[in-house]
Image (cartoon, rainbow, N blue to C red):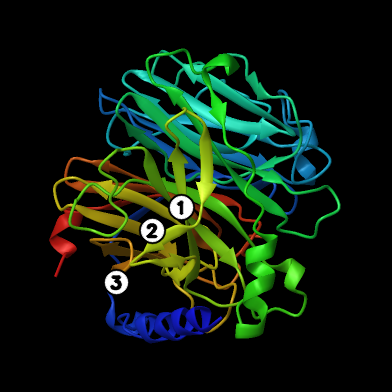
């Protein structure tokens, strides 16, 4: 139990090292690229972005809310509301200066967007786990294929690992239908990138990792500091790989990845780390990480009380983290920040990407991609007309120019 207390204390000290908001400049430019047709009932949830080899920006947006019943096109069977959700796709061929919406209407939600060479893939769910592909740069998408017919799944747009001819990602499955939110556990997924990833037969899955025991064991130490321990949980998992042999968690066999996720504990800047591994027999598993002979679970990750996004930059050999920055209110969603780390353990605050104009005007649940010397970012956002900070009415596009110059 002492290790949980130590981690919590370290996190508080480390998070206090961030530059105060009043001293930080805004790093990114901002442009509204999608506006809800009805901010009271149609909400724009987590967007995803990918840059194609031609330089095209492809953005997927998750429409949800009770008003989606009035939208043209199919909706997911399971949604944030009974009406279901719908994914739409936008494209930009001029570095984000102008955007056009494609005719695509996908009956999915909680999308993860990635590319393998020239092919784009999008994993999502409609209760069942689904996948679709595009072979024309996002102009059109295949009918979603079922990867797993079992309900019930969950995720947000998080990072995937593509290495040694394999793509590895995490989607999350509900522990049980009656479990309080967020009653989900990560499931590791892997497939060969040369295959048609819409074919369920090429994928393999780990058993679900049920976090309940870890959460309950931490309660006496103050983590999670919530009234009902069963309201604690882990979710929205990023998959990253340590490339430097001198860093913790490096695996010379190439068979393991680090899973970094939001921890719904009641404490800001506390996240969870686990290990995803492909065993020698080819099976997948999720395990506790080990460092210096001790298990690692809770760790300091800026803004990890909410969804965050990680990417690795080969030029700087740093992990870049796009995250919310709390200001003393647990569910603060207005400030979108950028940090970096050499090892996933020590984080340096780089600056603020964007700040919403009001408490209900969020800049959060963002996704980024590297385009040459810049970071291109899409954010789940809102203005003063947004229903609340969670249910936004905008998607905003941001560019952080020469992001590597932020390292100090």
Residue that label 2 marks: 322
Image location of residue 89, percent across then percent down: 51, 29
Image location of residue 197, percent across then percent down: 49, 18
- The Cα atoms of the two marked residues, 2 and 3, are separated by 10 Å
Q: The residue tagged with tag 3: helix, strand or loop? A: strand
Q: The residue tagged with tag 1: helix, strand or loop? A: strand
Which callout, 3 or 1, points to the residue nearer the camera?
A: 3
Q: Are marks 3 and 1 in contact (CB under 8 Å)?
A: no
Between 26 and 78, the residue placed more toward the observer is: 78
Quadrant in which the C terminus appears: bottom left
- The Cα atoms of the two marked residues, 1 and 2, are separated by 7 Å
**First in sequence: mark 2 or mark 3?**
2
Q: The residue tagged with tag 2: helix, strand or loop? A: strand
Quadrant in which the N terminus appears: bottom right
Q: Are marks 1 and 2 in contact (CB under 8 Å)?
A: yes
Image check: 297 left or right of 310?
right
Residue drawn 13% across the image and 60% down it:
405
Can residue 60 be seen in this snapshot?
no
Residue that label 1 marks: 366
Q: Name the image quarter holding residue 225.
A: bottom right
Image location of residue 19, percent across then percent down: 30, 81
Between 65 and 203, the residue placed more toward the observer is: 203
Q: Which mark is residue 349?
A: 3
Image location of residue 200, percent across then percent down: 59, 18
Image check: 184 left or right of 14?
right
- The Cα atoms of the two marked residues, 3 and 1, are separated by 17 Å
């Amino acid at each position: 139990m002492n290790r949980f207390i130590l981690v919590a204390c370290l996190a508080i000290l480390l998070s206090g090292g961030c530059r105060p908001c009043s001293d930080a400049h805004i790093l990114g430019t901002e442009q509204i690229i999608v506006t809800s047709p009805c901010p009271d009932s149609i909400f724009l949830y987590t967007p995803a972005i990918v840059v194609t080899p031609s330089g095209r920006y492809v953005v997927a947006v998750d429409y949800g809310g009770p008003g989606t019943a009035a939208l043209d096109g199919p909706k997911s069977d399971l949604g944030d509301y009974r009406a279901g959700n719908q994914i739409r796709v936008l494209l930009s061929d001029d570095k984000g200066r102008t955007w056009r919406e494609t005719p695509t209407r996908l009956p999915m939600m909680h999308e993860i967007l990635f590319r393998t060479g020239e092919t784009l893939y999008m994993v999502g769910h409609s209760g069942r786990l689904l996948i679709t592909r595009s072979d024309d740069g996002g102009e059109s998408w295949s009918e979603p294929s079922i990867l797993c017919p079992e309900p019930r799944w969950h995720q947000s747009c998080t990072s995937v690992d593509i290495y040694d001819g394999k793509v590895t990602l995490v989607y999350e499955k509900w522990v049980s239908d009656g479990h309080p939110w967020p009653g989900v556990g990560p499931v590791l997924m892997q497939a060969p990138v040369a295959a048609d990833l819409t074919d369920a037969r090429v994928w393999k899955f780990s058993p679900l990792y049920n976090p309940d025991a870890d959460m309950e064991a931490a309660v006496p130490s103050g983590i999670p500091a919530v009234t009902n321990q069963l309201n604690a949980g882990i979710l929205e998992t990023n998959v990253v790989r340590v490339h430097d042999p001198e860093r913790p968690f490096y695996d010379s066999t190439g068979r393991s990845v680090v899973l970094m996720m939001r921890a719904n504990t009641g404490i800001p800047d506390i996240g969870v780390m686990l290990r995803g591994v492909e065993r020698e027999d080819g099976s997948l598993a999720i395990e506790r990480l080990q460092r210096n002979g001790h298990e690692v679970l809770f760790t300091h990750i800026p803004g990890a009380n909410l969804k965050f996004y990680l990417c690795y930059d080969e030029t700087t050999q740093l992990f870049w983290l796009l995250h919310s920055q709390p200001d003393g209110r647990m569910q603060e969603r207005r400030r979108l920040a950028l940090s970096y780390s050499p090892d996933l353990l020590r984080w340096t605050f780089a600056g603020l990407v964007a700040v919403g104009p009001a408490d209900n005007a969020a800049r959060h649940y963002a996704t980024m991609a590297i385009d040459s010397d810049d970071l291109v970012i899409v954010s789940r956002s809102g203005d003063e007309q947004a229903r609340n900070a969670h249910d936004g009415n905008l998607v905003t596009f941001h560019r952080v120019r020469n992001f590597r110059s932020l390292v100090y």
